[in-house]
């Protein structure tokens, strides 16, 4: 048997195995559980109801903006009033409706398999951010929360994103030195105060960002205080430009 025939035979066997697996475990929608055409996807109804961000967005934080683009840099009012310490940012979804349910499932309901398709959505949303030699780093969890949750959802997103776009990922580039209280409901000023000096670079990983662009990854951006604290830690350790990419962005009216 020549090499071509051998490969063809192996492929036919693989197809039969795949067919058998799909008959036993047919692909289902990640959100509602209905049957879908492929694994790790959404059914047509859930896809329609998921608030993907498209069109004109703030170049700094990824917030959707009305109107079109004119070739010049565009920033939202919040970013103009209080400039972010990072360079550019994007988000894949608005944190509302079905997107919020998916993220809460990833974060609190032991659904790590959601990170893979979510990272694909993020790769699409952040396609203008990626740079050669860039290192991807997740927003860190405090060790006490990591033990309770068993995984850092931002680290899962970062790892899948790195594979998707072919960039290096360093899951422990940053560490959370202080356990901050839950930030939900806090103002931007309160968040910034609570996060001051709470995040630092891992002393044994600092060399991996020196002189390099860093892409920070998180599940949700609200005020941006956590990402700002991470950015300051990276800059203090000699990183070049900092970019941020999140799965979802909280809108003002969300």
Image: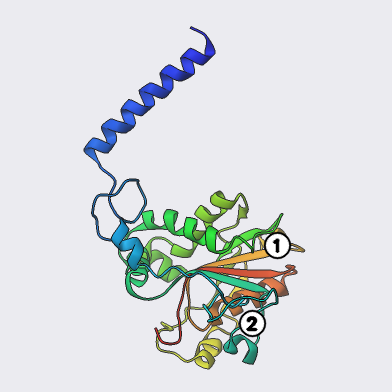
Give the labeled residue for mark 1. 209
Secondary structure of the residue carrying tag 2 is loop
Identify the image quadrant of residue 189. Answer: bottom right
Q: Do we see residue 22 in this rendering?
A: yes
The residue depicted at 44 percent of the width and 84 percent of the height is 183
Which residue is tagged 2? 84
Residue 15 occupies quadrant: top left
**Quadrant of the image occupied by residue 77:** bottom right
Foreground of the two, 31 or 72? 72
Q: Give x and y (percent) for residue 194.
A: 52, 87
Residue at the location (34% across, 64% down)?
A: 48
Residue 27 percent location from the top left of the image: 29, 46
Relative image position of residue 166 (x, y in whole percent): 61, 49
Name above or below for residue 103 compared with residue 178: above
- Residue situated furthest top in the rendering: 1
In the image: residue 125, left or right of residue 203: left
Quadrant position of the C terminus in the picture: bottom left
Tell me the distance, in whole angstroms, between the alpha carbons under discs 1 and 2.
20 Å
Dot 1: few (<14), some (14–19), or many (≥20) neighbours within 10 Å? many
Which is more toward the observer, 180 or 97?
Answer: 97
């Amino acid at each position: 048997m020549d090499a071509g025939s051998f490969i063809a035979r192996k492929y036919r066997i693989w197809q039969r195995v795949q067919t058998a697996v799909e008959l036993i475990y047919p692909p289902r929608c990640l959100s509602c559980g209905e049957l879908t055409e492929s694994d790790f996807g959404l059914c047509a109804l859930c896809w329609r109801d998921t608030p993907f961000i498209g069109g004109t967005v703030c170049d700094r934080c990824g917030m959707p903006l009305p109107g079109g683009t004119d070739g010049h840099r565009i920033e939202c009012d919040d970013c103009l009033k209080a400039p972010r310490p990072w360079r550019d940012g994007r988000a894949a979804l608005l944190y509302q409706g079905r997107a919020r349910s998916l993220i809460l499932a990833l974060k609190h309901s032991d659904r790590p398999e959601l990170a893979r398709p979510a990272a694909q959505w993020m790769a699409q949303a952040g396609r203008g951010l990626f740079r050669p030699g860039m290192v991807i780093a997740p927003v860190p969890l405090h060790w006490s929360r990591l033990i309770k949750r068993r995984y850092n959802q931002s680290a899962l997103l970062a790892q899948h994103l790195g594979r998707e776009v072919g960039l290096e990922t360093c899951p422990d580039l940053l560490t959370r030195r202080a356990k901050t209280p839950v930030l939900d409901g806090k103002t931007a000023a309160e968040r910034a105060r609570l996060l001051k000096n709470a995040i630092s670079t891992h002393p044994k990983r600092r060399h991996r960002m020196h002189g390099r662009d860093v892409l920070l990854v998180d599940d949700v951006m609200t005020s941006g205080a956590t990402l700002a604290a991470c950015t300051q830690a990276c800059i203090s350790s000699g990183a070049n430009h900092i970019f941020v990419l999140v799965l979802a962005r909280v809108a003002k009216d969300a």
